[in-house]
Image (cartoon, rainbow, N blue to C red):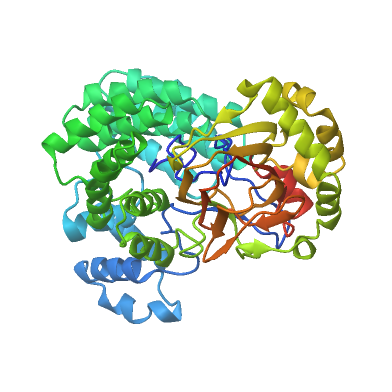
Amino acid sequence: MAQRKNAKSSGNSSSSGSGSGSTSAGSSGGSSSPGARRETKHGGHKNGRKGGLSGTSFFTWFMVIALLGVWTSVAVVWFDLVDYEEVLGKLGIYDADGDGDFDVDDAKVLLVKKKKPKLLNKFDKTIKAELDAAEKLRKRGKIEEAVNAFKELVRKYPQSPRARYGKAQCEDDLAEKRRSNEVLRGAIKTYQEVASLPDVPADLLKLSLKRRSDRQQFLGHMRGSLLTLQRLVQLFPNDTSLKNDLGVGYLLIGDNDNAKKVYEEVLSVTPNDGFAKVHYGFILKAQNKIAESIPYLKEGIESGDPGTDDGRFYFHLGDAMQRVGNKEAYKWYELGHKRGHFASVWQRSLYNVNGLKAQPWWTPKETGYTELVKSLERNWKLIRDEGLAVMDKAKGLFLPEDENLREKGDWSQFTLWQQGRRNENACKGAPKTCTLLEKFPETTGCRRGQIKYSIMHPGTHVWPHTGPTNCRLRMHLGLVIPKEGCKIRCANETKTWEEGKVLIFDDSFEHEVWQDASSFRLIFIVDVWHPELTPQQRRSLPAI
């Protein structure tokens, strides 16, 4: 979860009187054209900065230069009069890790005596100059030259772990540059070769296998990554951070039970480990142990440990608090919003495209999909009758909501389209409805939504929840609506359905449903792309 956000631990439901599709395992999409909106995954770390030195990095350089007695250089930093090559040359003697130059990590060694990884064994120290030369090419972005340099070093010194690790890093960089999965698979293989050599320094072994696991996850090779993580824990049994990573590995394959065991082990040794706490809390909540999950999620976030400032943990903490009637829920939603995880307190979707118009309720005219709305409302009896026929003939086609969104009651759906794919078997039960919809690609092609019938029986309450993305809007066509007792709240406005009429709302905003009538409620749910998404974005955004 703290590594890739496509895990099964995704915080959002895509339901609103409906079920959801699975979260995509691919990387985030978005248009690559100039000025196009880009999809952002709320909940990740936001430490990257553009431009010049940050306050922290300037302070670091200031202190290092001071330590070396070159105060005069500081006085002219802002006038670009420093001969940086000369200064860096002087600092080169403080290269602590054998990567060929002095960098911020080396500065930290001077300032806080942070232990830097040791990457060189005795043999590699004898060829350090050659290793440094190749590494400098890589760090200067001359990837192809660096690949060739490290390949030659591996040929000359096949027993050198550092040379092979450099080759793996270059292949890794080259894969990113070329966007090539094939090259990345080569890097993964080379990282494994490093770990298989004799006399590999422990730090280098750990770095190689950790990166191998990370890259395996990137390619979606979750079980292969899990094997790598298991080996790491076997090699370094006292490293709780590796056990935390192993827990994530189990979560990524949906093995919550083994993940739970890992985090229980970590917390038995380091009870204040924030990373373990938030993940353990998440697992408890997934097991519907709502009240038990709250202190772990809350204390984990409050710890400020790396990997805990993630939108999904704020999401699940607030949701758990809402379910037990704790009014502090919105305090955590507000904090999540202030920290950039949520677009607002009400709009808490995590897979978003920035800049899209955001409001809870929409009119047909505002969406631009007036022809679709007219067609639905004009043909509502046809749509209703086919849905009722399916209910009568094959009740098993209506599947119960399975996302733990109900406080109580009976709620099922019959899905015709999912993630932009037509369900041929389902459409045999509602052929006229499916033919009608084929005319409207804004819904049949919406890979972040569904088209479905939704039936809700008396005595049902759906917890407040939000959908996973701001990239869609949701239409509800009333088919069989009791005279009273059925209502839906989106944000702070509550509405009721009417037979033959369409309600439109943005389900990335918090919404809640009550069915307190004396008979069933049947609606038809039609998701559409957000009207401000470009054609390119609609083609390239990964499915949800």
Work out whether residue 191 or residue 244 is closer to the camera in this orientation and state it: 244
Work out whether residue 11 or residue 39 is closer to the camera in this orientation and state it: 11
Horizontal side, residue 507 vs residue 198: left or right: right
Q: What residue sits 81% from the left and 35% below the top?
A: 433
Q: Position of residue 257 (x, y in %)?
A: 31, 25
Q: Position of residue 239 (x, y in %)?
A: 20, 34
Q: What residue sits 41% from the left and 62% below the top?
A: 85
Work out whether residue 52 or residue 373 is closer to the camera in this orientation and state it: 373
Work out whether residue 389 or residue 122 is closer to the camera in this orientation and state it: 389
Q: Which quarter of the figure is the N terminus placed in?
A: top left
- The quarter holding residue 404 reads top left
Q: Which quarter of the figure is the C terminus placed in?
A: top right
Q: Is residue 283 above or below residue 48?
A: above
Q: What residue sits 83% from the left and 38% below the top?
A: 382
Horizontal side, residue 245 vs residue 365: left or right: left
- Confirm whether residue 160 shows in the render: no
Q: Is residue 196 above or below residue 259?
A: above
Q: How many numbered markers are drawn?
A: 0
Q: Is residue 484 above or below residue 237?
A: below
Q: What residue sits 43% from the left and 21% below the top?
A: 223
Q: Position of residue 424 (x, y in %)?
A: 76, 23
Horizontal side, residue 461 vs residue 271: left or right: right
- Confirm whether residue 176 shows in the render: yes
Horizontal side, residue 231 vs residue 315: left or right: left
Q: Position of residue 542 (x, y in %)?
A: 63, 41
